[in-house]
Image (tube, rainbow, N blue to C red):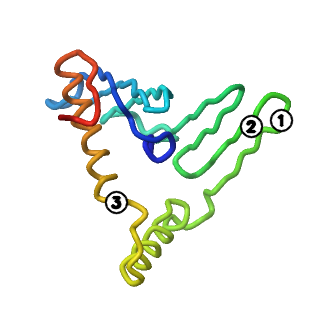
Amino acid sequence: MCRFLLGDIDSLICRARSTSYEELDGFTAILHSASGVLVTFHSCAHATWIFPFERMEIFGPHQAAVTEEMERVTLSPGLGREIVTRSYSQLPMEEKWGYRMEDRRFVDAVLQGQPPNVTAEDGLRATEMVEACYRSARAGAEVRLPLG
């Protein structure tokens, strides 16, 4: 999601620990995008079941966009401007999570010979970021991307 919204990530630093499982199960990372944007990321494998389970917040100058489980999106477009909240809780899961559109675009790409929206390169970069988090957590140091 970070690459989709902000472009390539050129470095990250991650701390992790094991609290409930043998493997690392809690992660905190700071990602640095090639465009200069900093992203904080938190993940916990044993978090409580308090809604929202997933939340994304993006901040700009006096601006914010917040997603909560694809159930609700709130946009604060700037000082003196109206804050808007949209609820998607009544939509079928396939629609609000994008599966229907995702499937349609994939089938269209295959049948019409078009490039897919998500490429093998996208998958590689996402996997690489996960590996970089593990390397950074083990070494206690910043890791540059792409991995060598």
Residue at the disc numbered 1: 81
Separation of residues labelled 1 and 3 (CA atoms): 37 Å
Query: In this view of the protein, which residue sits in the foreground, 142 or 46?
Result: 142
Label 1: how many residues lie within 10 Å, few (<14), some (14-19) or many (20+)? few
Give the residue at x 69% y 31%.
Answer: 63
For residue 119, the mark is 3
Q: Amino acid at mark 2?
A: Pro
Label 2: how many residues lie within 10 Å, few (<14), some (14-19) or many (20+)? some
Separation of residues labelled 2 and 3 (CA atoms): 31 Å
Q: Where is residue 60 shown, x and y percent of the image? A: 64, 29
The quarter holding residue 118 reads bottom left
Query: In this view of the protein, which residue sits in the foreground, 50 or 15?
Result: 15
Q: Where is residue 61 shown, x and y percent of the image? A: 68, 26
Considering the image in quadrants, where does the N terminus appear? top left
For residue 113, the mark is none
Residue at the disc numbered 2: 77
Q: Of circles 1 and 3, which is in front? A: 3
In the image: residue 107, left or right of residue 91: left
Q: Where is residue 73 shown, x and y percent of the image? A: 64, 46
Pointer 2 or 3: first along the chain: 2
Separation of residues labelled 2 and 1 (CA atoms): 6 Å
Q: Amino acid at mark 1?
A: Arg
Q: Amino acid at mark 3?
A: Thr
Q: Are marks 2 and 1 in contact (CB under 8 Å)?
A: yes
Give the residue at x 21% y 30%.
Answer: 134
Considering the image in quadrants, where does the C terminus appear? top left
What residue occupies the far bottom of the structure in this picture?
111
